[in-house]
Image (spheres, rainbow, N blue to C red):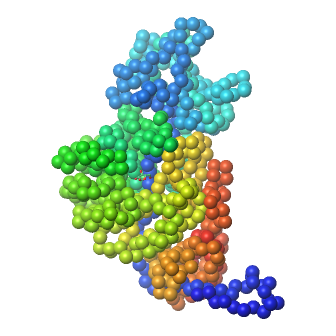
């Protein structure tokens, strides 16, 4: 393809400016639009891993707010003076609470500090809503002081703000005050202590939220993180995982019914990511379920995504359980099947139905219009189809309109994958979930992965994927570039691939178990990785229909002889988006030819960097970000130059 030319010696200096390379020619066929690109195509995968929920997206700042952490009811708290833990509280599923009494010396204090999740992040001048359920056993009244404290302060006062709160009467009542810190601090402490005449008081469900959450919800989400989701324009929102769906054992599986209703009464669940990797062990990682299924459906609606819940199929995590007795026998699956049916009722049922009423009581009488449900996560062997069939039968019977997602196991190919795909076809799953956390070579070799998939079978949900470089398992530009390259193949095969979600989504810089991840944060700041930008660009330039794009009559898939190029094209009304990923180290001149149709160049988005091992960071969040340039030219073919190791989107108008 490259034409070598001989330059006279005197012209050699022109080498940098005069290209001797013949342009490669990409033919984009505008005469015929192909398959529609599903609105669900690019989406998000949420799992409570890496402190993604409590300590992350869920804006609650208090850890162990209900005093239910099983190893120590006061984990996350520092008690001083006379503090007792009691367990006959007002919320049946969270029975523990604390009793604060007079320390019996006028110069001593009784109270509690909460350390938050890696500290409590607060911003100067912002409002924080403190709330607590409380009562005074004697029936009298008791005075509390609530402070946000900088314990390392060199100033006269440790506190950044304080408020007094009077608790009155024997009945459990919810109290709240708003605190406004006078300084910004990443690692503050919440302090509550008895003042006044130190009358004994009982406290339960101690909570602190920023007032300014996403959409202002009281039980809300951290605004910058929810915004980072909304900005992806995600078409599909998978929740709550991941392995967390299955549980290390069935008792610790994600039980959606425990995640709805008043937050005070949602029972704590173990988080398997606390201990899954002993080399990154977090003994204080639990799920409060404060971000539960109602919040998931609401957030999906608010960011314009279709919700995709994944539920347990009665198999505990198969990585962690060889013993068949860890799983539910098929003939005892009914409660699990009922959970799935009830979830659909919770999302879509009328307010007069049992679960529709729970939804309505939580503030959303209108249905959430759920269309998809996944049963099982990374399951395998005959056990999985055996468990899936009764779910499919029951869901089809009760809700024939709901599309069901099955699984092809944990691998992108191999024994389980080859076994499960035909099984999913037999069972009639609407979509099949594929997972691939794979190295560079895999991503470079998979540009044509879906070109020969069965067009009649279930559709593909690429439900978890990310480029995991060997020996470099962290976010970096080159890995993201290969994800962009791979995604051209997803886009070209939009008739087969209906959904794709990068995974995992979130990670706290001090609390991660797994990387790379899409969005990182500490207690105050966050940043969007290069992979986030890749996802965002695909979401923004999704288009409506595929277009055929070829080089020498072949799809551009990074195949041998294609010089490390991957490409795809889509139509969006009068607009045409051509995506090109150059994974080679040389710039490429490409002539984009539109089959005799005249187009004009509008703009081009460039994602390019020579910092292959780097990504964005909390300190430099825009280290590597896309740049939009204007794109001139008009005609039936337009020449472009694609930089080495770069991702380009060219936008044309017909
Ligand atoms: O995304 C992290 C984990 O990877 C998921 O929980 C699981 O499904 C996969 O193995």
Please report the residue visible at 46 percent of the width from the left and 30 percent of the height from the top: 65
Where residue 540 appears, as percent x and y from the top left, is 52, 65
Residue 603 visible? The answer is no
Where residue 57 appears, as percent x and y from the top left, is 50, 45
> Seen in the image, is 11 located left or right of residue 140?
right
> Seen in the image, is 297 located left or right of residue 543?
left
- Residue 188 sits above or below residue 589 on the image: above
Quarter of the picture holding the N terminus: bottom right
Where residue 382 appears, as percent x and y from the top left, is 24, 57
Residue 251 found in image quarter: top left
Q: Nearer the viewer, residue 274 or 609?
A: 274
Of all residues, the one furthest to the right in this rendering is: 10
Please report the residue visible at 28 percent of the width from the left and 57 percent of the height from the top: 381
> Seen in the image, is 210 located left or right of residue 337?
right
- Residue 65 sits above or below residue 299 on the image: above
Residue 22 found in image quarter: bottom right
Residue 154 visible? The answer is yes
Where residue 614 appears, as percent x and y from the top left, is 63, 58
Number of numbered discs on residues? 0
- Residue 118 sits above or below residue 302 on the image: above
Quarter of the picture holding the C terminus: bottom right
Please report the residue visible at 61 percent of the width from the left and 42 percent of the height from the top: 524
Please report the residue visible at 53 percent of the width from the left and 48 percent of the height from the top: 507
Residue 584 found in image quarter: bottom right
């Amino acid at each position: 393809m490259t034409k070598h030319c001989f330059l006279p010696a005197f012209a050699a200096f022109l080498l940098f400016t005069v290209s001797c390379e013949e342009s490669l020619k990409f033919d984009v066929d505008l005469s015929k639009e192909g398959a529609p690109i599903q609105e669900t195509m690019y989406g998000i995968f949420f799992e409570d891993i890496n402190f993604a929920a409590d300590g992350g997206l869920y804006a609650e700042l208090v850890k162990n707010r209900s005093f239910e952490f099983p190893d120590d009811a006061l984990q996350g708290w520092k008690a001083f003076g006379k503090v007792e833990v009691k367990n006959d509280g007002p919320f049946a599923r969270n029975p523990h609470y604390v009793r604060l009494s007079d320390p019996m010396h006028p110069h001593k204090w009784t109270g509690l500090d909460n350390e938050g999740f890696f500290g409590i992040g607060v911003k100067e001048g912002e409002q924080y809503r403190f709330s607590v359920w409380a009562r005074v056993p004697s029936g009298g009244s008791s005075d509390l002081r609530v402070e946000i404290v900088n314990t390392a302060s060199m100033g006269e006062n440790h506190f950044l703000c304080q408020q007094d709160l009077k608790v009155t009467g024997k009945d459990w009542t919810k109290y709240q005050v708003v605190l406004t810190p006078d300084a910004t601090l990443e690692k503050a402490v919440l302090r509550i202590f008895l003042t006044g005449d130190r009358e004994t008081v009982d406290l339960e469900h101690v909570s602190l939220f920023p007032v300014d959450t996403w959409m202002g919800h009281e039980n809300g989400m951290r605004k910058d993180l929810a915004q980072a989701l909304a900005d992806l324009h995600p078409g599909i929102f998978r929740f709550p995982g991941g392995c967390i769906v299955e549980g290390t054992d069935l008792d610790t599986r994600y039980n959606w019914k425990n995640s709805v209703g008043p937050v005070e009464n949602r029972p704590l669940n173990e988080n398997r990511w606390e201990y899954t990797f002993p080399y990154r062990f977090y003994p204080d990682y639990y799920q409060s379920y404060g971000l539960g299924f109602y919040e998931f459906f609401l957030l999906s609606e608010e960011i314009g995504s279709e919700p995709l819940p994944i539920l347990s199929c009665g198999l505990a995590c198969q990585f962690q359980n060889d013993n068949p007795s860890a799983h539910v026998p098929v003939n005892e699956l009914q409660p699990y099947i009922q959970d799935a049916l009830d979830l659909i009722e919770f999302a879509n049922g009328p307010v007069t139905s049992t679960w529709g009423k729970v939804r309505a009581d939580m503030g959303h009488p209108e249905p959430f219009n759920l269309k998809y449900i996944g049963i099982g996560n990374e399951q395998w062997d005959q056990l999985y189809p055996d468990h899936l069939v009764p779910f499919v039968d029951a869901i089809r019977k009760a809700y024939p309109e709901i599309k069901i997602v099955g699984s092809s196991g944990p691998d992108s190919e191999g024994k389980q994958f080859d076994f499960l795909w035909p099984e999913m076809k037999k069972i009639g799953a609407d979509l099949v979930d594929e997972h691939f956390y794979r190295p560079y070579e895999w991503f470079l070799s998979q540009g044509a992965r879906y070109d020969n998939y069965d067009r009649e079978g279930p559709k593909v949900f690429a439900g978890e994927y990310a480029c995991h470089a060997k020996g470099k398992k962290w976010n970096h530009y080159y890995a993201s570039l290969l994800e962009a390259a791979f995604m051209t193949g997803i886009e070209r095969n939009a008739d087969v691939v209906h959904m794709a979600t990068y995974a995992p989504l979130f990670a706290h810089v001090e609390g991660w178990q797994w990387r790379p991840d899409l969005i990182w944060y500490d207690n105050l700041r966050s940043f969007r990785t290069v992979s986030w930008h890749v996802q965002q660009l695909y979401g923004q330039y999704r288009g409506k229909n595929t277009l055929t794009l070829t080089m020498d009559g072949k799809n551009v898939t990074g195949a041998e002889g294609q010089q490390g190029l991957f490409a795809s094209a889509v139509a969006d009304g009068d607009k045409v988006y051509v995506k090109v990923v150059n994974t080679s180290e040389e710039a490429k001149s490409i002539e984009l030819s539109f089959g005799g149709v005249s187009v004009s160049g509008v703009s081009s988005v460039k994602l390019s960097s020579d910092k292959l091992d780097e990504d964005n960071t909390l300190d430099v969040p825009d280290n590597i970000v896309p740049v939009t340039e204007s794109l001139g030219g008009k005609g039936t073919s337009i020449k472009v130059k694609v930089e080495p190791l770069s991702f380009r989107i060219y936008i044309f108008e017909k």
